[in-house]
Amino acid sequence: MAVTTKATIASFGGKLLKCAHSASSTKCEMAFNLYMPPQATSNPSHKVPLLIYLAGLTCTGDNGAEKGFFQHAASQKDIAVLYPDTSPRGLKIQGEDDSYDFGSGAGFYVDATQEPWSNGYKMYSYITSELPKTVFDNFSQIDGGRVSIFGHSMGGHGALTLFLKNPGHYKSVSAFAPIANPINCPWGQKAFTGYFGADNKSKWAEHDATQLVKNWKGDNLDILIDVGTSDNFYHQSQLLPENFAKAAEGKGKVDIRWQEGYDHSYFTMATFADDHVGHAARYLLG
């Protein structure tokens, strides 16, 4: 599928591209940001790995690209960074714009099975299949065999679940303040009720990182998670990272770093951005 590049912005020696394409899985035009590091912009035959950043509630692909400062380390490590949107846009489904935590800007990286959301709210398929294929087909510098994933909040949930549901597909995963046990928090319960139905609890469990990690049979995990001690959503029990850590016992390393005084904002992500890009680089470049 063809990609339209609507803007090109110089960033840390490379180029941040503002792109759009027509997506069949979400039945609308989808925008995304793509950062190409310096060597990939100057030499079209130079291959670079890809790090996918999944954003949180209300966000678009612009938020992480413009406020996360992930390009700084990505330019040094020679890694491309892909910033997708968080939901379909403009499908004209009744209620899709009524609240910040469901519908537009809140696709939760799942394929909805409940009508009317099943008609376009297919973010799992979009992120795992259609968007990467589109990027690989249109940007020959990106090595489709070397892909990692990370995210924030709802995007942290997405990163963890996509990694755990697809062993071997992603080289690494990390997260900032992830919604780590959505079946047991208000955000997740609202989203899963709407997208899957209130009684389809088996489907809920398929998209809950805490449930998925209990059955992990892959290589030993090495997951980096940062949570701020002043994160108001953590204190409202929306994140529940301790539940994930407990469920992951015996499965490898889950490094939850409690960052004193930091909150849920992009200031936190910008502060620790280099660590997360570095975590991915160990697997993408090793």
Image (tube, rainbow, N blue to C red):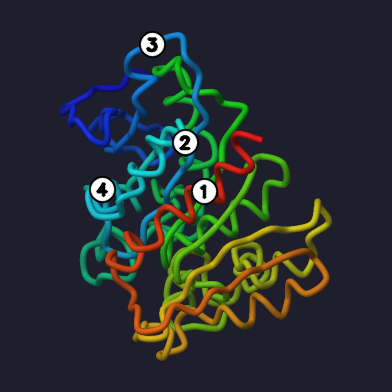
Q: Find the distance from the CA under tag 1 to the CA under tag 3.
A: 23 Å
Quadrant of image for the C terminus: top right
Identify the element where label 2 is drawn: helix
Identify the element where label 3 is drawn: loop
Residue type beneath disc 4: Arg
Question: Quadrant of the rendered structure where residue 55 is?
Answer: bottom left
Q: Verify CB contact (< 8 Å) between mark 2 and mark 4.
A: no
> From what the image shows, is residue 215 above or below residue 274?
below
Q: Which residue is mark 2?
A: 77
> From what the image shows, is residue 60 above or below residue 19?
below
Is residue 19 visible in the rendered image? The answer is no
Q: Verify CB contact (< 8 Å) between mark 1 and mark 3.
A: no
Circle nearer the N terminus (1, 3): 3
Question: Quadrant of the rendered structure where residue 74 is?
Answer: top left
Residue type beneath disc 1: Gly
Circle nearer the N terminus (2, 4): 2
